[in-house]
C-alpha cells in the first residue's frame, strides 16, 4: 500500500495521481456501492447517513469528515484507506 499525501492550499487540494482526493473518494465510493448492488438509499441506511448526503459525496460536492469516511468504509466492509486510494 502506498502512502498518499495531500495538503490543502486555500480551497483547492493538491492533485495526486491526477485526481483530487474528493474525486478519488467519490469514484471509489460509487464503484464499491455499485459492486454491492446497493442504491444510494440502501447504502445510506447501511452507513447511518442520509441519502442526499451520500449523493453529495459521490458528486464531490461534500467534504466528509474522517468519522464519516470511517462509517462509509465500515458499511462497505473495507478500510478507510481503500476509499481514498
Image (cartoon, rainbow, N blue to C red):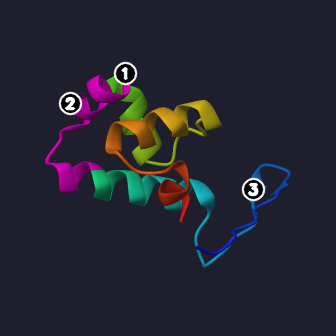
**Label 3: which residue?**
12
Closer to the chain start, of discs 3 and 2, is 3
**Label 2: which residue?**
42
> Between residues 66 and 63, which one lies in front from this camera angle?
66
In what element is the residue under mark 2? Answer: helix
Residue 11 in picture, x, y percent from top left = 78, 49
| Residue 34 counted in the magenta span | yes
Q: Which residues are magenta?
A: 33-47
Q: Quadrant of residue 47?
A: top left
Q: Is 38 displayed left or right of 44 in the figure?
A: left
Q: Residue at x 64, y 75 (%)?
A: 2
Q: Is 68 displayed left or right of 46 in the figure?
A: right
The residue mark sitting in front, 3 or 1, is 1
> Between residues 35 and 8, which one lies in front from this camera angle?
35
Q: Which numbered disc covers residue 50? A: 1
Closer to the chain start, of discs 1 and 2, is 2
Q: Quadrant of residue 9?
A: bottom right
Closer to the chain start, of discs 3 and 1, is 3
Amino acid at each position: 500500500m502506498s502512502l498518499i499525501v495531500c495538503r490543502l492550499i486555500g480551497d483547492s487540494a493538491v492533485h495526486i495521481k491526477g485526481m483530487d482526493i474528493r474525486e478519488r473518494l467519490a469514484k471509489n465510493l460509487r464503484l464499491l456501492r455499485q459492486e454491492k448492488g446497493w442504491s444510494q438509499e440502501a447504502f445510506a441506511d447501511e452507513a447511518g447517513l442520509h441519502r442526499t448526503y451520500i449523493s453529495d459525496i459521490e458528486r464531490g460536492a461534500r467534504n466528509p469528515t474522517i468519522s464519516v469516511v470511517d462509517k462509509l468504509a465500515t458499511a462497505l466492509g473495507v478500510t478507510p484507506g481503500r476509499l481514498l486510494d
